[in-house]
Image: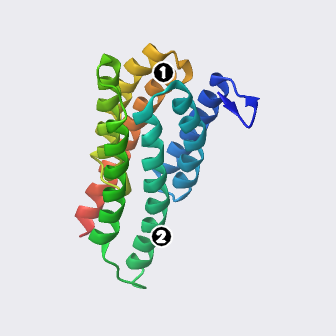
Amino acid sequence: MTLFSLPIPTLVLDLTGGLCVLVSLYYLFSKSPTYWHWSNASLLPYFLLFLGGGQWMLAGLQVTYLLFGVHGLYLWHLEARRARGEIRFNERAWYGVTWAASLLIFAYTVAVTDFSQAWNGVQFAAVTLALVANFGTTRRWAWAWPVWIAVNAVQAVYFWHTGYWVLFALQFVLAAMSVYGWRVWRRDEARAVAFA
């Protein structure tokens, strides 16, 4: 990948994105807004990595992640203010805007992808599952974690094929972290039901 006439090795982009993702998940377990900052920081190296490799759907997914990231951070802020009784807001409309924009980006990247190549079908499956998992994550629903595990499984196969070795190894770490996150969030949901 060349950026502003500077060659950037694929491995540097792969490592930088992976480190940011690992830090972000540490904060996601506790549902800290800091998650969104680290998650958003991972998007540029991954966008450049996928753009350089011609993986249009995965590059487009980084743009939708950015929409979810900025929007999710703001919504978590609004939800915290609502929980303190400071405001009311139209949650359905706020989430609807993000989904409409994300689906438009997804439709565009699907349109520019050549599906005569079988591996683009694998890319499509990973991106579709990731969009569903992102929806659950922004809502802080525990079922998002098993969907992330499915994303990791599909992406591991794809990244093995493309030779993105850090991303390949990262899928196993992320899957293990997702199992932990699922347990933590299910416990939180059970507590919320018990105190309701």
- Of residues 118 and 125, the one drawn nearer to the viewer in this rendering: 118
**Residue drawn at (37%, 39%) of the image:** 109
Which residue occupies 27% across, 68% down? 195
Tell me the residue at 32%/38% (across/down). Answer: 111
Q: Is residue 149 above or below residue 91?
A: above
**Callout 1: 10 Å neighbours few (<14), some, many (20+)?**
many
In percent of width and height, residue 41 lies at 60, 47
Where residue 70 appears, as percent x and y from the top left, is: 49, 59
Please name the residue that numbered disc 1 is placed on.
168
Name the kind of residue labelled 2 in the image: His
Give left or right: position of 164 versus 187.
right
Q: Quadrant of residue 81?
A: bottom left
Residue 9 point in image, percent of width and height:
68, 23
Say which mark, if any, is on residue 77. 2
SS category of the residue bearing label 1:
helix
Above or below, 183 relative to 69: above
Q: Quadrant of the C terminus?
A: bottom left
* Element carrying mark 2: helix
Residue furthest to the bottom: 86
- Residue 128: x %, y % from top left: 29, 38
Neighbour tally class for label 2: few under 14, some 14-19, many 20 plus, Cα within 10 Å? few
Say whether residue 54 is visible.
yes
Q: Are marks 2 and 1 in contact (CB under 8 Å)?
A: no
Disc number for residue 107: none
Q: Is residue 96 left or right of residue 23?
A: left
Q: What's the coloring here?
A: rainbow
- Residue at image location 44% in from the left, 60% down from the top: 72
Q: Amino acid at mark 1?
A: Phe
Specify which label sits upstream in the sequence, 2 or 1: 2
Is 100 on the left or on the right of 87, as rendered? left
Question: Is residue 139 in view from this perspective?
Answer: no
